C-alpha cells in the first residue's frame, strides 16, 4: 500500500508498506505469495525485476525433473527414507533434509491441483522414474518445461488472489535494524521511472521479506542460466546474510546461443563432437585424440545423458566426464569453439554412412533398441526418441537438423547459497531466502530436488510468517531513522557513477571480462594459486568500481547494480573455494581441484591433470559472511552437519505442540 514520500538529502522517495514483501517471480516466490494469501496473510506484495525473466520460466532440460517422495505402489518409501537420500549427498543438514522430504508430497499435489499436468496411470498412481543419486523411482516430469508450467500455474493463483505486484522493480538493498539485526525494509529501483530527481528509488517498509531471487546467474560467462536472469545474492550478502556451501555448483554441457542443458536424449542419440577455430575453420573431431577406441568414445557420449553434470569421480577408465574436460581444453585453453553435429555419427564409429551398432556397449545398444531407435544418424535417433527436443531449438531459431549446435561446459545450478534454518529464516531475522538462492542442497543432490526445494521452502517460510510474524511494520518515522545511513550510502554510490553522454557505456565490457575470468578460474576446474590471484583482482575491481565503469544514461542504473551485486557474489564464491582448498578439500561434487600430489592423473596431449577424491568434508558445511566498507572482507566458519532428527513423534504430544504453536521454533 502506498504510504507517501520521505526525503533523504533532499531526494524524495515513494514509500510502500506491507506485512510481507516477496522478492522474485519464479516458482519459489510465486508459491510463497500464493501460500501467504491462502493461509490468511493478505497484506503482501510481490516485487520482481520482470515477471517473465526468471530461471524457472526460461530453463529446462531434455526431461526436467521434479523430485518427491515416491507415490508408486512398487516403491516402499517414507519421509525418513527420502531424507536419508538427500542427507547422504553430503554437506546438507539432516533436519532440513527431513523437512524437504516430509513436505514433498504436499507441495507436489498442490501443483497438480492448480493444473500442472504431472502424469498418472489408470489407477491414479503418479508413477516415477529413477533420477541421479536416487535409489527409488521418485522423479516425475511434464517434459522439458516442467518449471515453466509451475510458474505459469502459480502466477495464475497470485493474479486471482489480487496480490499487489510491482513489476520492473530491482532490489538494490536489504534494509535492517542494525541493533536488533532484523530486516525491516527494501530499497528498490523503479526501472520504468528512473530520472534525475530521485533515480527511481522506492522504499518498502515491511515486517518480513521472502527472498526468491534465484541463483547468482550472472557470475559466469559459460552459463546455461537464461540471459534475462541475474540473481541478487550479493545484495543479501552485503546486508550480512550468511551463506553456506558457496563452493557447490553443477556444471554440464549446454548450448550457448540458446542456453539449454544438453542431457538425456541429446547425448543418447550419440551426436558427433567437433571443434573449430574462432572463424569455424580447421574442423576436427577432438574426442578421437583421447579415446583409444570407438567403443569407449560412443559409450562416454551416451552416458552423458544420464551423467550430465561434470563429476571428477567419472574421469577414470574413460568415464563420461572426460568429455567435459576435453571441451574445457578446447574452449578455455586452446581458445577454440566446440559444436554438436546431429547429422553425422562420430567418424570413428561410422560404417556406410550409419552408426556401427556392433561397437556399442550393452547399455547404449539395449537403450536404443528398446526405444526403436537403431537408426542411421543421430538426428533420426533423436527424432524417434524425443521429437520435442528438436522442436525446442526450432522455436528458438536453431535448426539442428541442418546446422551445428555450439556448446560449452556451463554453470547450471548453485547447490549452495544463503543460509536458513528449518523455517528458511536466515541469521538476519524476518529475512527468508527461498528457492535456489537458499543453499540447502549440499554436494550431490538427486536430480529434480531443486524444484521440490522451491515449493517446500517457500511454504515453510510462509507458514512461519503467518503463525509468528503477523505484526505491522514499524512506524515510518522510526524506519527512516534506522535506515537513513543505509539509503544515503546507496544514493552516494549512484552519484559517484560517471555519466558520459558522448560515448557508449562500458558496462557490458566490464561485466564480460569478469565473467570470463570467473569461468576460467572458478568453475569446474579449480587451482589454488589462480583463485588466490583472482580474488586479489576481483577485490580491486570492487574497490575501484565507480572509477572503472561509466554509463551513457541514467537508464543504465539497473545494469550498474547488477554488476555490483555480481562482483560481491564472485568474491564470496572464490573466497569459499579457496577456503575449502586451503583446508585440504579434494575434488568433489561437480568440480576438480588441481593437486600436484593427487592420487589420480589424467594426461591429455602435454597436459596433466592431477587430483584426489579422499577428503570431501561431507560431514561439514562452510559458512561464509561478507563485510563491506570501502573494501570487501570475507570470513568463513566450518560447522558440523546437523543429523536427521530422531525423536518420539507421539501423536498426542505433536497435537498439543501444534495447537499451542510450540512447533514454530527457530531451530538451527
Image: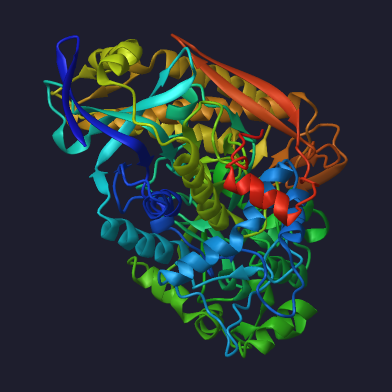
Q: Quadrant of residue 352?
A: bottom right
Q: Quadrant of the C terminus?
A: top right
- What residue is drawn where x is 71% and y is 59%? 79
Residue 504's x, y, as percent? 20, 30
Q: Nearer the viewer, residue 260 or 465?
A: 465
- What residue is drawn where x is 66% and y is 40%? 525
Please tell me whether residue 463 is drawn above or below residue 301 in the rendered image: above
Q: Quadrant of residue 178?
A: top left
Q: With 664 as the anchor, is 196 left or right in this view?
A: left
Please tell me whether residue 407 is drawn above or below residue 511 in the rendered image: below
Residue 339's x, y, as percent? 51, 60
Please tell me whether residue 316 is drawn above or below residue 581 in the rendered image: below
Residue 600's x, y, as percent? 85, 44
Q: Quadrant of the N terminus?
A: top left
Residue 180's x, y, as percent? 49, 16
Q: Is residue 504 visible?
A: yes
- What residue is drawn where x is 67% and y is 88%? 370
Q: Is residue 489 visible?
A: no
Q: Number of marks in the image?
A: 0
Q: Nearer the viewer, residue 36 or 320?
A: 36
Q: Which color mode does the image show? A: rainbow
Q: Nearer the viewer, residue 477 or 446?
A: 477
Q: With 213 as the anchor, is 137 left or right in this view?
A: right
Q: Quadrant of residue 594?
A: top right
Please tell me whether residue 350 is drawn above or below residue 100 in the rendered image: below
Q: With 651 as the anchor, is 221 left or right in this view?
A: left
- What residue is drawn where x is 64% and y is 41%? 248
Q: With 137 as the anchor, is 112 left or right in this view?
A: left
Q: Nearer the viewer, residue 329 or 532?
A: 532
Amino acid at each position: 500500500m502506498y504510504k507517501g514520500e520521505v526525503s533523504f538529502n533532499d531526494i524524495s522517495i515513494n514509500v510502500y508498506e506491507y506485512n510481507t514483501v516477496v522478492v522474485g517471480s519464479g516458482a519459489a516466490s510465486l508459491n510463497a505469495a500464493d501460500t501467504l494469501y491462502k493461509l490468511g496473510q493478505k497484506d503482501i506484495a510481490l516485487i520482481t525485476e520482470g515477471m517473465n525473466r526468471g530461471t524457472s520460466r526460461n530453463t529446462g532440460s531434455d526431461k526436467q525433473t521434479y523430485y518427491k517422495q515416491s507415490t508408486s505402489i512398487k516403491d516402499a518409501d517414507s519421509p525418513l527414507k527420502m531424507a536419508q537420500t538427500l542427507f547422504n549427498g553430503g554437506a546438507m543438514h539432516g533436519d532440513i533434509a527431513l523437512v524437504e522430504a516430509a513436505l514433498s508430497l504436499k507441495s507436489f499435489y498442490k501443483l497438480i491441483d492448480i493444473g500442472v499436468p504431472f502424469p498418472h496411470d489408470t489407477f491414479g498412481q503418479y508413477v516415477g522414474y529413477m533420477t541421479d543419486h536416487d535409489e527409488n523411482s521418485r522423479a516425475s516430469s511434464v517434459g522439458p518445461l516442467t518449471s515453466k508450467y509451475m510458474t505459469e500455474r502459480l502466477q495464475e493463483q497470485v493474479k486471482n488472489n489480487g496480490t499487489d505486484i510491482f513489476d520492473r522493480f530491482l532490489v538494490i538493498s536489504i534494509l535492517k535494524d542494525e541493533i536488533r539485526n532484523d530486516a525491516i525494509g527494501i530499497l528498490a529501483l523503479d526501472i520504468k521511472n528512473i530520472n534525475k530527481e530521485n533515480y527511481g528509488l522506492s522504499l518498502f517498509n515491511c515486517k518480513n521479506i521472502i527472498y526468491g531471487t534465484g541463483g547468482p546467474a550472472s557470475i559466469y560467462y559459460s552459463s546455461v542460466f537464461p540471459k534475462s536472469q541475474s540473481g541478487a545474492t550479493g545484495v543479501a550478502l552485503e546486508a550480512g546474510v550468511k551463506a553456506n556451501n558457496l563452493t557447490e555448483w553443477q556444471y554440464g554441457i549446454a548450448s550457448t546461443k540458446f542456453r539449454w542443458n544438453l542431457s538425456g536424449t541429446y547425448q543418447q542419440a550419440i551426436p558427433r563432437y567437433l571443434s573449430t577455430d574462432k572463424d569455424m575453420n580447421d574442423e576436427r573431431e577432438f574426442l578421437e585424440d583421447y579415446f583409444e577406441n570407438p567403443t569407449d568414445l560412443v559409450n562416454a557420449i551416451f552416458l552423458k545423458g544420464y551423467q550430465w553434470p561434470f563429476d571428477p569421480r567419472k574421469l577414470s577408465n574413460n568415464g563420461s566426464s572426460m568429455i567435459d574436460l576435453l571441451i574445457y581444453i578446447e574452449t578455455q585453453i586452446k581458445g577454440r569453439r566446440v559444436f554438436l553435429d546431429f547429422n553425422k555419427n562420430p567418424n570413428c564409429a561410422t560404417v556406410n554412412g550409419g552408426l556401427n551398432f556392433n561397437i556399442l556397449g550393452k547399455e547404449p545398444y539395449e537403450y536404443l533398441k528398446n526405444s526403436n531407435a537403431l537408426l542411421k544418424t543421430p538426428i533420426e535417433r533423436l527424432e524417434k526418441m524425443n521429437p520435442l527436443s528438436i522442436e525446442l531449438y526450432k522455436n528458438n531459431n536453431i535448426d539442428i537438423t541442418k546446422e551445428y549446435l555450439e556448446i560449452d561446459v556451463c554453470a547450471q545450478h548453485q547447490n549452495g547459497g544463503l543460509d536458513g534454518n528449518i523455517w528458511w529464516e536466515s541469521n538476519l531475522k524476518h529475512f527468508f531466502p527461498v528457492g535456489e538462492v537458499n543453499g540447502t542442497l549440499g554436494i550431490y543432490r538427486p536430480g529434480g530436488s531443486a524444484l521440490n526445494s522451491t515449493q517446500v521452502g517457500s511454504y515453510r517460510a510462509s507458514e512461519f510468517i503467518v503463525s509468528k510474524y503477523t505484526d505491522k511494520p514499524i512506524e515510518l518515522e522510526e524506519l527512516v531513522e534506522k535506515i537513513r545511513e543505509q539509503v544515503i550510502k546507496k544514493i552516494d554510490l549512484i552519484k559517484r557513477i560517471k555519466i558520459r553522454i558522448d560515448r557508449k557505456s562500458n558496462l557490458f565490457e566490464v561485466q564480460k571480462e569478469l565473467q570470463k575470468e570467473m569461468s576460467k578460474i572458478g568453475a569446474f576446474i579449480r587451482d589454488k594459486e589462480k583463485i588466490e590471484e583472482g580474488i586479489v583482482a576481483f577485490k580491486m575491481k570492487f574497490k575501484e568500481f565507480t572509477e572503472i565503469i561509466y554509463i551513457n544514461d541514467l537508464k543504465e542504473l539497473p545494469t550498474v547494480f547488477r554488476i555490483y551485486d555480481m562482483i560481491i557474489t564472485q568474491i564470496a564464491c572464490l573466497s569459499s573455494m579457496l577456503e575449502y582448498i586451503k583446508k585440504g578439500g579434494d575434488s568433489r561434487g561437480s568440480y576438480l581441484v588441481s593437486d600436484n600430489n593427487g592420487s589420480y592423473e589424467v594426461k591429455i596431449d602435454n597436459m596433466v591433470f592431477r587430483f584426489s577424491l579422499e577428503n570431501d568434508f561431507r560431514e561439514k558445511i562452510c559458512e561464509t559472511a561478507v563485510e563491506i566498507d570501502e573494501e570487501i572482507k570475507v570470513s568463513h566458519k566450518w560447522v558440523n552437519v546437523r543429523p536427521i532428527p530422531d525423536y518420539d513423534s507421539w501423536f498426542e504430544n505433536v497435537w498439543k505442540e501444534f495447537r499451542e504453536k510450540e512447533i514454530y521454533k527457530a531451530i538451527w
